[in-house]
Amino acid sequence: MATVAPGVPTGPYHAVLDHIHPEPTSFIRKYIFSIDAKVIGIQYMITGAIFFVIAGMLAEIIRTQLLSPHGAIISAATYNSVYSMHGSAMVWFVVIPLLTGAFGNFVMPMQIGARDVAFPWLNLVAFWIFPVAGVILFSSFLIGAPDAGWTEYPPISLQGPPGTNLWCVAVFLIGISSTMTGINFLVTMYKMRAPGMTFTRMPLFVWAQFATTPLLFIATTALGAALAALFIERVFGVPFYDPKRGGSPVLWQHMFWFYSHPAVYIMIIPGFGIISEVLPTFARKPIFGYKMIAFSSVAISLLSFSVWAHHMFTSGMVPWLQLPFMIITMVIAIPTGVKIFSWMATLWGGSINWKTPALYAAGFLITFTYGGLTGFFLAAVPLDYHEHGTYFVVAHFHYVLYGGSIMSMFAGIYYWWPKMTGRMYNEKLGQLQFWVTFIAFNATFTPMHWLGLLGMPRRVATYDPQFQFWNQFATYSSYVMALATVLFFYILFDSFRNGKKAGPNPWGARTLEWMVSSPPPYYNFKKIPAVLAAPYDFGNPLPYLGLDAAPGATEATPTSVSHPVPTY
Amino acid sequence: MAVSVASHGHDAPHDDHGGHDDIIYNETRDMRLMGFVLFLVSDVVLFSSYIFAYIYLRNSIQPNWPPIVNGHQLPRLDTAFAAFNSVVLFGSGVTMHYALENWKHANKGRFNLFMFFTILLGLGFLGGQAYEYAHAQIGGWSGNIFGASFFTLTGMHGGHVAVGVGFLIALWIQAQRGVYTQSKFFGLTAGTLYWHFVDVIWVVLFFLFYLW
């Protein structure tokens, strides 16, 4: 590595970084079975978007059913299958693959100054498991879709329709894919960072992916074990969960939530990473509390392994165990609060450039904080006794999953769209799309808190007529959300046709992916740059040495030192 | 050229002198080692989950162990035979260690001998397990929670041993075909690690099912 300046620490892994693969020429190897992490990231994104649309339609079926207290359109049995599949698809086939597989693959290798992930072939296999598993999941509708909720608690799931077996297989497969991705990303981030990129110089999105990987390859395996046991109990009659035969339904809950609580952090920590990239870029300010944001991700990741039983306060658990689980759950609010306040301090006094990603990031701050607060309520054992299994819980996790994960994904897609495609989206329509989504989202889910507090149970196809007004209100609002989603896809298609050329760095951002042309060349960097500092010091010169203008890039460093303003 | 994640290219822009492939090999070997160890960590969680399930079912559901099924007290497992079978498996761990050491010291003849015994002992362990399965009077896999935990956990372990035997045979063939050299033998390292991993899991299972 002759390009490294004096004083830049160099690791031992640079021959690999210096190595450039020949670019494949055939269509199949370039776009279908590609080993390029950027292509795989976009493949994840397209596949996840398709599943998002399907699972979103299931959500609209749920809402339409609830227009009438007696159930407007479908039978109670079908309703059970519909909400089970909606939850399963959204959790495992939309949010997790999009935040790790899609954004992680597209952004992370470029942000650490690498050409690809550590195991490109493993990456290819991990991606292709995803659509196959998705097809298996949705084909369960043909033989009777699972009907015990996305959590599939036994003994109901033991008696569930045959599609429950397909559900087990599909989720098991996507778990294998997650495990592969987790191992692949951790090795990539640990071994393949550009020279000079110490841990405390990594972009915060990379830190977020770094904190997520142990959850992916440790917790997911526990889910695989639970699913395999459910499968063999259903198919071979081996008793694990059936209380009539000495098994224990609560055992499933332990194994399931040992995965699924960490999984909620798989679904939010990468979102934190996106927000941490978007906010300083649009506030034109160094991020506040870089190390605190980075380390709090790791703290959340570690703590998340010791809180699973807060989902089980009403399941029959030794009372003295409830207290530590309640306290540790509440302790997670501390690192999360550290992040929220750091982001607010980042915005404070900045000359905020309210483009769509910034709007989404600000929207995220509001809705995610709201969802986090209701989560804090639910962690309290007495309140959980009252609210468990009601719409309050539904409202809570939609505020963190839609208001947190999906909002951060919208922010991320708008933010990196110019990098992926080389074209800008229509900014006015983007902002309109944000406002419609934000308002309709809150109108859909805020009333559910009230319904839950009044005692409306979740997962039931009918309800007491006194709840009708707010249910109808939520349903009509959810239709507006659906329209906003249609608008979102229109904006993306419109950008292909009418979008302005973006140039390498339309936002004036400072992380490494913006230092190459848009869309990036196959090998990302012709020469691997050396990194001198963390990337958020807006107003200072870029902390990179040896950046080489990639072919097609008009400028290698589009943000000039003296005028750190966006160039769009 | 050895198998390596980043060594398909022939147009590396610089460092194209003689040692380039060696450097790339060493760097990708470290990555693959880390990836493989992380895979084993993930596998530990898989076993831990079922071990947790076994302990959970045993402790909180059935205070009397082995359980009484339909008024019939199930017998304990045959500890003496399992101890003998464990010695067979641990013996294969020892021979695998010496196989790798002899490879590092370029002692091909002894490497072959120790590989042969490792595979033989591995197959012997599987045979012993099959014998034990045929003679265990605990009501079969799907009979009760004792059979469910025992056959699931030991069966999963046996599956790992079977995969390991296949892995070792493949490595042995690769070694005969000259894929590995005295300095480039990552496959053998991974195979040894995996084999020791399977041994360690068995120590835990042996304690849980035969001594507890």
Image (cartoon, coloured by chain):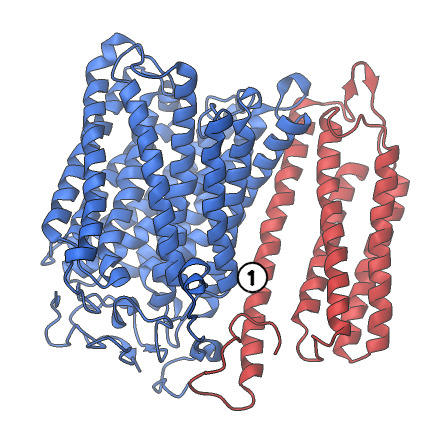
Chain A appears in which tint?
Answer: blue
Q: Is residue A295 visible?
A: no
The residue at the point 61 percent across, 79 percent down is: B1
Residue carrying label 1: B35
Quick check: B58 left or right of A568? right
Q: Is residue A254 above or below residue A553?
A: above
Mark 1 nearby-residue class (10 Å; few <14, some 14–19, many ≥20): many
- Up the image or down, A366 lies above or below B164; here it is above
Kindly identify which chain the residue marked by label 1 belongs to: B
- Label 1's element? helix
Residue sitting at the far bottom: B17
Residue A538 visible at all: yes
Q: Is residue A105 left or right of residue A498?
A: right
Viewer-proximal residue, A564 or A504? Answer: A504
Q: Is residue A63 above or below residue A258?
A: above
Residue placed at 18% from the left, 42% from the top?
A487
Residue A419 on image: x %, y %: 26, 63
x and y percentages locating residue B24 in the rendered image: 54, 78
Q: Position of residue B133 (x, y in %)?
A: 83, 36
> Quadrant of the rendered structure where residue A286 is?
bottom left
Q: Colour of chain B?
A: red
Q: Is residue B13 above or below residue A431?
A: below
Please state which amino acid type lies under the numbered disc 1: Gly
Could you tell whether A356 is left or right of A529 in the image? left
Answer with the quarter of the image where residue A470 lies.
top left
- Residue pictured at 81% horizontal, 14% vertical: B71
Quadrant holding the C terminus of chain B: top right
